[in-house]
Amino acid sequence: MPELELLVRQIRLEARNVHSYELVHPQGAPLPGFEAGEHIDVQVADGLLRQYSLCNPPGERQRYVIGVLREEQGRGGSRGLHQGWRVGQLVRVSPPRNHFALRPGARHVLLLAGGIGITPLKAMAHQLQAQAVDYELHYCARDAQCAAFADELRSSLDPARLHLHLDGGDPSRGLDIAALLAAERREGTQVYYCGPAGFMKACASAAALWPAGSVHCEHFQAPDRPVCDGAPSAGGFTVQIASSGLRLHVAAQRSIVEVLREAGIEIATSCEAGLCATCKTGYLQGEVEHQDCILGPDEQRTHLTPCVSRARGELLVLDLYIVPSFDPRAAPRLRRAACARPARPAGGAC
């Protein structure tokens, strides 16, 4: 589906350093439908693409709403929106895509949000309430001024299902995540969580003993990745393009994407941290140290994210093909051999 050109109809201050942006069709036409957990790729500026979760109720077709925290130490996407976007301007976004979908059939759903991680979980709460599914939303923030969308949540959700936890900057005064997940662990319960790094680590630790397939998360920033023992990637490895046989050396501390780009091989990227699957690429041979936070185990058997993935062996064969007009002396352009993404969620399970 082609990208959309939408109108910024409204910008609201939702919390300290958090703005929401309401996007509509310029002529008032309905937008492609979406489900909870979906995000859109936003073209912040030329060459700068970022993903933001849709946080309005999924049944709405007349608008998309995203919430953006201004990150002063980020890579420029959130600052670009806060500084550059204005009411009335046209912006380019992708149709919605989902790597963090609600799984059907749950008896009870537990939603855990930390800070700006509320955005995908807010949409989940709206969808679960509309479907009369049993759920609880626990929203953790520093103080009331940092709790984005809190007034809307109070007015639109069943108050018995919404739990706001304000810790004043001291996690010991906030939600006891370990105790909550220990008490809620029972058959038929699904857990979804999203938030900053410390929050994600606490949730992952508390959910470590839950059954496989019952815990799901979405990262907004890459967690610390330990170096894999015994992986020879520290000394570099070779990637081979399946269709042409072209081989390129990936040195230590270099990414596959960087090496391909220098060779003139264009693969779409966005986060370059293994969080968004924009660069997802098939591979045909080799053992992969994936290091991403988005692909599920089934997909990792056939696909990798070249922005962060490394080889455990000496060679990775990438499932890419060269456009017939390929000329190695002119900037070559490659396309993915399997360019269609599966319709099902791509991952996010922890």
Image (cartoon, helix red, strand yellow):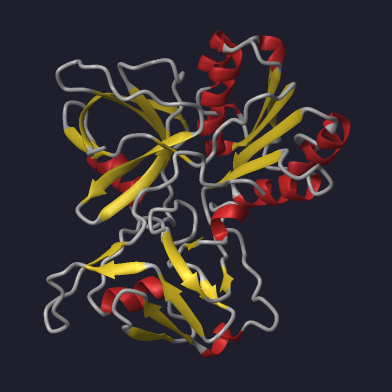
Nearer to me, 89 or 297: 297
The quarter of the picture where residue 13 lies is top left
The image quarter in which residue 64 lies: top left
Residue at 74% over, 21% down: 107
**335 with respect to 178 (left or right):** left
Percent across and percent down for residue 85 are: 24, 37
**152 left or right of 298 in image:** left
Residue 317 vs residue 208, the one in the foreground? 317
From the viewer's perspective, is residue 109 above or below residue 349? above
Is residue 96 positioned above or below 316 on the image? above
x then y, percent, for residue 145: 54, 29
| Image x and y of residue 83, in percent | 27, 42
Residue 155 quadrant:
top right
> What residue is at 80 percent from the left and 45 percent from the top?
206
Q: Residue 168: horizontal and vertical position, in percent?
A: 68, 36
Relative to 246, does residue 181 appear above or below in the rendering? above
11 and 177: which is toward the camera: 177
- The residue positioned 26% from the left and 37% from the top of the image is 1
**Does 51 sit left or right of 1 as displayed?**
right
Label tally: 0
Q: Residue at x 29, y 39 (%)?
A: 94
